[in-house]
Amino acid sequence: MANTFVHTELNTTDVRKAKEFYGKLFDWQLEDMAGGMDYTLIKAGENSIGGIMKHPMPGAPSFWLSYVLVDDIHASTAKAKSLGATPIKEAQEVPGMGWFSIFLDPTGACFAIWQTKK
């Protein structure tokens, strides 16, 4: 089903502290990704529900970012922009997984869209 929230990601200033806190608070299983990316998957049981990463913007506060599933990343990116969203990052590929774009909506709220690789 398209247009549902599918992933929530913590962009944090302190990955170690965040992993310790949330792992203990919710009993989440935290799995560091292999490869060149410093990224931790959050699992609740067998389900991947989100991730934790070092905030990519130095000096910015930690925040949670929600991703909405779309069928076509390029069409949805263009539509968001036409409706007044400000792009932060447009149609970035995550090799082997899919594509995402990140925006500020017209009220200033941050959100992301995600297209899964088929």
Image (spheres, helix red, strand yellow):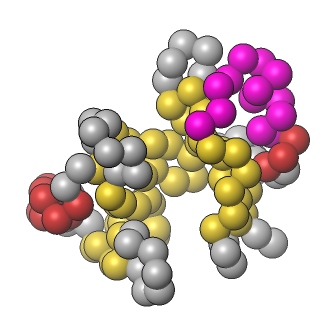
Instruction: Specify whether residue 82 is painted magenta.
Output: yes
Percent from the top left, x then y, of residue 15? 23, 61
Asked if 81 appears above or below 72 in the picture, the reply is: above
41 left or right, relative to 4: left
Residue at (28% x, 73% y) in the render: 29
7 left or right, relative to 32: right
Res 43 → quadrant: bottom left
Return the residue found at the far bottom: 34
Asked if one can make out residue 69 in the rendered structure from this viewpoint, the answer is: no
The C terminus, quarter of image:
bottom right
Residue at (45% x, 50% y) in the render: 8
102 or 21: nearer the eye? 102
Percent from the top left, x then y, of residue 96? 68, 78
Percent from the top left, x then y, of residue 98? 70, 65
Asked if 117 appears above or below 17 in the picture, the reply is: below
Asked if one can make out residue 108 in the rendered structure from this viewpoint, the answer is: yes
Instruction: Specify whether residue 118 is painted magenta.
Output: no
Please provide the residue range marked out in magenta. 76-88
Residue at (51% x, 54% y) in the render: 7
Return the residue found at the far front: 58
